[in-house]
Image (spheres, rainbow, N blue to C red):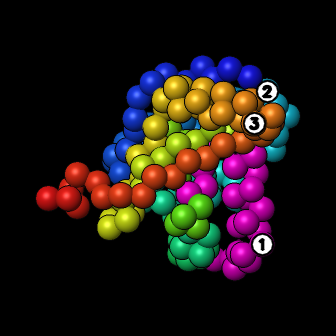
């Protein structure tokens, strides 16, 4: 598969307006309908929480936020299943080094994710650089390896923390 991503960066620390979140949710609803995927109320609630936060959220932080918004107790496996669905659909990304999740800044795409992660403040910058993916695929081809998904996390310090 060839990626249709444009070449740019997106900081997950950028404040997303309610209009941006609403627009993304509307697109995601349409995508789910076209795929026959069921976007339950809980999945939608988890997605909105991930999208509204500046920093990546871990599963237990999500559980705490959900508890604050709901009168019913939501068990960890339920939240993990919602996260798994959102990951599978390409609506969020998992930042493995932080054991946390961020919203996908572009339309759902192939499972290719490249991030710059600030080790100081936790800011995550998503890279949309097709050349990175092309180099990975070329190296894999040379090694007779079939790439199923790729994720690259580069740890460092953001410009704000470097000052």
Quarter residue 100 falls in: bottom right
The answer to if 73 sits in the magenta stretch is yes
Mark 1 vs mark 3: which is more N-terminal?
A: 1
Rendered residue at 45%/52% (across/down): 154
Q: Which residue is mark 3?
A: 143
Q: Which mark is residue 42?
A: none
Q: Quadrant of the N terminus?
A: top right
Q: Which residue is mark 1?
A: 77
Rendered residue at 48%/29% (across/down): 129
Q: Count all numbered tags in the image, as a single digit.
A: 3
Q: Which residue is mark 2?
A: 34
Task: Residue lying at the far front in this picture: please name it.
Answer: 142
Compared with residue 133, is residue 120 higher up or lower down, i.e. above or below? Answer: below
Q: Is residue 22 left or right of residue 137?
A: left
Circle 2 crowding by C-alpha within 10 Å: few under 14, some 14–19, many from 20? few
Provide the secondary structure element on which disc 3 rests.
loop
Provide the secondary structure element on which disc 1 rests.
helix
What is the spatial separation of the Cα atoms under label 1 and label 3, in whole angstroms?
A: 38 Å
């Amino acid at each position: 598969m060839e990626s249709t991503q444009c070449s740019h960066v997106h900081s997950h620390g950028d404040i997303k307006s309610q209009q941006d979140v609403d627009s993304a949710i509307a697109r995601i609803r349409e995508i789910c309908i076209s795929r026959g995927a069921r976007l339950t109320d809980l999945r939608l609630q988890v997605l909105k929480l991930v999208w509204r936060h500046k920093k990546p959220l871990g599963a237990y932080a999500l559980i705490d936020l959900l508890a604050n918004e709901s009168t019913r107790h939501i068990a960890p496996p339920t939240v993990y299943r919602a996260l798994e669905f959102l990951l599978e659909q390409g609506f969020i990304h998992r930042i493995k080094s932080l054991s946390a999740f961020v919203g996908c800044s572009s339309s759902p795409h192939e499972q290719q994710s490249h991030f710059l992660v600030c080790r100081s403040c936790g800011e995550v910058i998503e890279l949309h650089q097709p050349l990175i993916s092309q180099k990975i695929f070329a190296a894999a081809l040379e090694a007779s390896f079939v790439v199923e998904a790729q994720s690259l996390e580069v740890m460092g310090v953001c410009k704000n923390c470097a000052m």
